Image (spheres, rainbow, N blue to C red):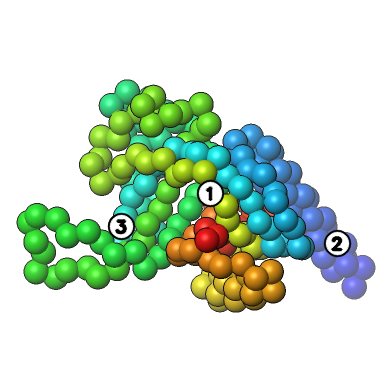
């Protein structure tokens, strides 16, 4: 029995060490990423009202998050006219259920909805100075100064968890008598390898 306990204790020790290393790695990565700046106007637990300055984004609409992310990552990884890397900035914004624009030639199997994803560019860039994407499905845009409501939550962004956050955001909007304007955006701040308990996610919506 004592041998079994020693083996079990050793396994627990190794597991705890691995978790601690994972946790430390997550904190290191988080500290090295520029975040989009904002001013908190009002806070109520995980719910905030914020003001954001103008910010340049690289944006694309695709049939899946995987495809949208692949295009945008290629852009910041050098697939631009300047051929240079662009630093990753948090968060990554995703909006589901976006209508896909019709292009020529017209497909016989049209897609009715998709996913819009945006990477916020570092604050040093303007629309004029940001590298031009080589992929014409990626466009640069300026998200102008806006006032938003945000609900913060953690863990992996499963459909169920995002739906719960959406309900809580809507309840907070009602409680604070705020009028939303536009679609809810899912903001994710962390590398997919970040420990779930350290992940920062938010549902964000513009306010009228």
Q: Nearer the viewer, mark 1 or mark 2?
A: 1
- The residues tagged by marks 1 and 3 sit, at their Cα atoms, a distance apart of 25 Å
Residue at the location (55% across, 60% down)? 207
Judge by depth and name the residue closer to the eye, 122 or 47. 47
Image: 172 above or below 187 = below
User: Disc 3 designates what residue?
Assistant: 62
Relative to 142, is 139 on the left or the right?
left
Residue at the location (40% across, 35% down)? 76
Judge by depth and name the residue closer to the eye, 170 or 158. 170
User: Disc 2 designates what residue?
Assistant: 9
- Residue 24 numbered tag: none
Q: Do the numbered discs 1 and 3 sit on residues whose CB atoms are within 8 Å?
A: no
Residue at the location (90% across, 73% down)? 1
Q: Is residue 154 visible?
A: no
- The residues tagged by marks 3 and 2 sit, at their Cα atoms, a distance apart of 49 Å
User: Disc 1 designates what residue?
Assistant: 146
- The residues tagged by marks 1 and 2 sit, at their Cα atoms, a distance apart of 53 Å
Image: 186 above or below 56 = below
Q: Residue 44: where, in percent of width, then height?
A: 76, 62
Q: Earlier in the sequence, mark 1 or mark 2?
A: 2
Query: Picture quarter containing residue 154?
Result: bottom right
Q: Earlier in the sequence, mark 3 or mark 2?
A: 2
Query: Picture quarter containing residue 32?
Result: top right
Q: Secondary structure at mark 1?
A: strand
Q: Residue 69: where, in percent of width, then height?
A: 39, 50
Q: Earlier in the sequence, mark 1 or mark 3?
A: 3
Residue at the location (11% across, 64% down)? 107
Relative to 61, is 196 on the left or the right?
right
Q: Secondary structure at mark 3?
A: strand
Q: Secondary structure at mark 2?
A: helix
């Amino acid at each position: 029995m004592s041998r079994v306990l020693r083996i079990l204790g050793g396994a627990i020790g190794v597991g705890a060490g691995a978790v601690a290393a994972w946790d430390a790695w997550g904190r290191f990565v988080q500290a090295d990423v520029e975040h989009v700046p904002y001013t908190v106007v009002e806070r109520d637990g995980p719910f905030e009202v914020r003001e954001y300055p103008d910010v340049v984004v690289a944006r694309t609409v695709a049939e899946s998050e995987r495809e949208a992310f692949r295009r945008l990552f290629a852009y910041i990884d050098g697939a631009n006219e300047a051929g240079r890397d662009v630093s990753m900035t948090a968060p990554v914004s995703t909006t589901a259920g976006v209508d896909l624009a019709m292009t020529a030639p017209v497909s016989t199997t049209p897609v009715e909805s998709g996913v819009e994803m945006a990477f916020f560019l570092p604050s040093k860039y303007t629309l004029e100075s940001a590298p031009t994407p080589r992929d014409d499905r990626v466009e640069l845009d300026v998200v102008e100064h806006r006032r938003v409501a945000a609900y913060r939550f953690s863990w992996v962004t499963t459909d169920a968890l995002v739906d719960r956050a959406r309900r809580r955001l809507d309840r907070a909007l009602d409680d604070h008598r705020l009028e939303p304007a536009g679609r809810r955006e899912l903001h994710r701040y962390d590398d997919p390898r970040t420990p779930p308990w350290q992940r920062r996610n938010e549902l964000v919506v513009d306010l009228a």
